[in-house]
């Protein structure tokens, strides 16, 4: 059945100038080409697509143009609730959408809150503290160097540099100062994980499907403990992806287990990508979860899907179909049409 599908997104080119204070300020937002590819994939499945760029006109657009469901990749511009904004608007209008609800999206954007939840369910994650400014750094931070410092509410390695790994109090203070000043948000100071890095794409709801585990490695031969998947690495294509990751079955099972348990306890819906890294003893640790994973040609989620035999068009259609099944959209639409028919015939009789 073809639906009218709204497509909600934030384009890099629309990023407010006030946000453009640093070179990776727009790292989270979409290129026009990504939006076009998603629209094309939805049309290929027989749906009509209504583009809904994020911005002040979105609410009136939704009230004016009827859509059956929204394919949501809108990240919002600023703040830890930014990813929750479009879903909250859609909830208020009763319009179904792909992906997680506002609560999950807001929780998962705040890495400290996410870690507090996952660790309370026994999912291993490195110890961390969130600090608003350098003055909040306790004399004894209670963790051994090296530590890792990153923005508390970002993604796409925004605010992550090779200098994020800090080896001394002096480097720690400098990094916290840079993050809190540049990104106007708290810094998360976390134990450094020296091991290999993996990411796991997940699709589904009650039944979850994982894509082949992807390992992210530096393109050049570097020891894992010196590898940070940072903005510069991404920007200059200095990483390589191994998918499926060359790991023994038992380790793969433990990595998948961390990813799936995190997806479940955070009550994600339809899709997410979970980053996992090994600690010094080789144990998988939860780093973070992306309930709105990137869908560009270079994004890890579609690359892993492809390795699992799902090409981009099929992936977009699977995401929509997963949400359609979750909200029982066919039945919902049939019921709406029956109500409309009844009111039309009542009007005709009167
Ligand atoms: N505690 C850590 N130890 C080692 N590397 C880390 C740690 N936290 C983050 N990194 C590195 O920084 C990258 C980005 O961090 P991540 O938490 O995934 O944030 P983002 O939301 O920007 O993807 C990771 O892919 C990893 O390479
Ligand atoms: Mg990440």
Image: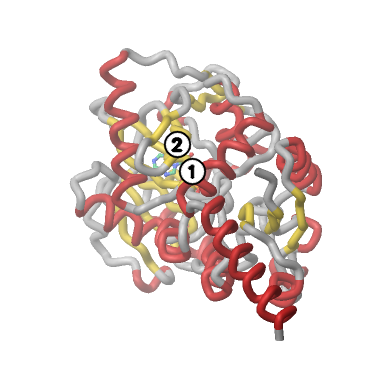
Are the residues tagged 1 and 2 within 8 Å (C-beta)? yes
How far across and down, in percent of the image, does residue 254 sit?
27, 27
The residue lying at 75 percent from left, 55 percent from top is: 12
How far, Cα to Cα, is label 1 from label 2? 5 Å
The residue lying at 52 percent from left, 54 percent from top is: 331
Quick one: label 1, few (<14), some, or many (20+) residues within 10 Å?
many
The residue lying at 59 percent from left, 58 percent from top is: 333
Return the residue nearer the eye: 53 or 42: 42
Disc 1 on helix, strand or loop?
A: strand
How far across and down, in percent of the image, does residue 253 sit?
29, 23
How far across and down, in percent of the image, does residue 121 sit?
20, 50
* Left or right: residue 22 compared with residue 90: right
The residue lying at 71 percent from left, 66 percent from top is: 66
Return the residue nearer the eye: 254 or 69: 69
Q: Which residue is mark 2?
A: 202
Return the residue nearer the eye: 348 or 268: 348
Decide: is 132 above or below 309: below
How far across and down, in percent of the image, does residue 269 sit?
44, 49
Q: Which residue is mark 1?
A: 271
Q: Label 1 CB, ligand 2: below 8 Å? A: no
Q: Which is nearer the N-term, disc 1 or disc 2?
A: 2
Decide: is 114 above or below 33: below
Return the residue nearer the eye: 121 or 207: 207
* Left or right: residue 85 compared with residue 49: left
Evaluate whether residue 113 shows in this view. yes
């Amino acid at each position: 059945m073809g639906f009218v599908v709204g497509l909600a997104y934030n384009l890099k080119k629309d990023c407010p100038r006030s946000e453009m204070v640093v070179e990776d300020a727009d790292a989270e937002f979409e290129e026009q080409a990504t939006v076009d590819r998603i629209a094309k994939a939805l049309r290929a499945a027989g749906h009509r697509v209504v583009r809904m760029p994020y911005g002040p006109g979105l609410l009136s657009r939704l009230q004016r143009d009827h859509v059956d469901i929204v394919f949501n990749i809108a990240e919002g511009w600023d703040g830890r609730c930014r990813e929750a904004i479009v879903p909250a608007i859609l909830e208020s209008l009763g319009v179904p959408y792909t992906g997680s609800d506002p609560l999950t999206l807001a929780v998962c954007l705040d890495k400290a809150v996410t870690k507090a939840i996952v660790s309370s369910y026994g999912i291993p994650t490195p110890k961390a503290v969130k600090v608003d400014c350098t003055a909040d750094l306790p004399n004894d931070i209670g963790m051994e160097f090296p530590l890792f410092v990153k923005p508390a509410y970002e993604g796409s390695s925004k605010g992550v540099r090779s200098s994020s790994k800090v080896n001394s109090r002096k480097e720690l203070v400098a990094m916290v100062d840079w993050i809190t000043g540049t990104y106007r948000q708290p810094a998360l100071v976390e134990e450094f994980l020296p091991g290999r890095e993996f990411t796991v794409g997940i699709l589904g709801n009650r039944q979850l499907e994982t894509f082949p585990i992807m390992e992210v490695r530096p393109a050049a031969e570097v020891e894992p403990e010196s590898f940070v998947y940072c903005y510069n690495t991404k920007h200059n294509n200095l990483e390589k992806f191994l998918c499926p990751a060359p790991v023994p079955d038992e380790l793969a099972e433990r990595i998948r287990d961390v990813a799936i348990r995190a997806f479940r306890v955070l009550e994600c819906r339809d899709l997410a990508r979970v980053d996992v890294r090994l600690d010094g003893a080789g144990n998988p640790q939860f780093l973070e979860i992306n309930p709105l994973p990137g869908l560009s040609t270079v994004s890890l989620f579609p690359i892993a899907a492809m390795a699992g035999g799902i090409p981009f068009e099929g992936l977009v259609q699977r995401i929509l179909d997963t949400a359609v099944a979750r909200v029982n959209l066919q039945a919902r639409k049939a019921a709406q049409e029956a109500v409309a028919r009844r009111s039309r015939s009542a009007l005709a009789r009167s």
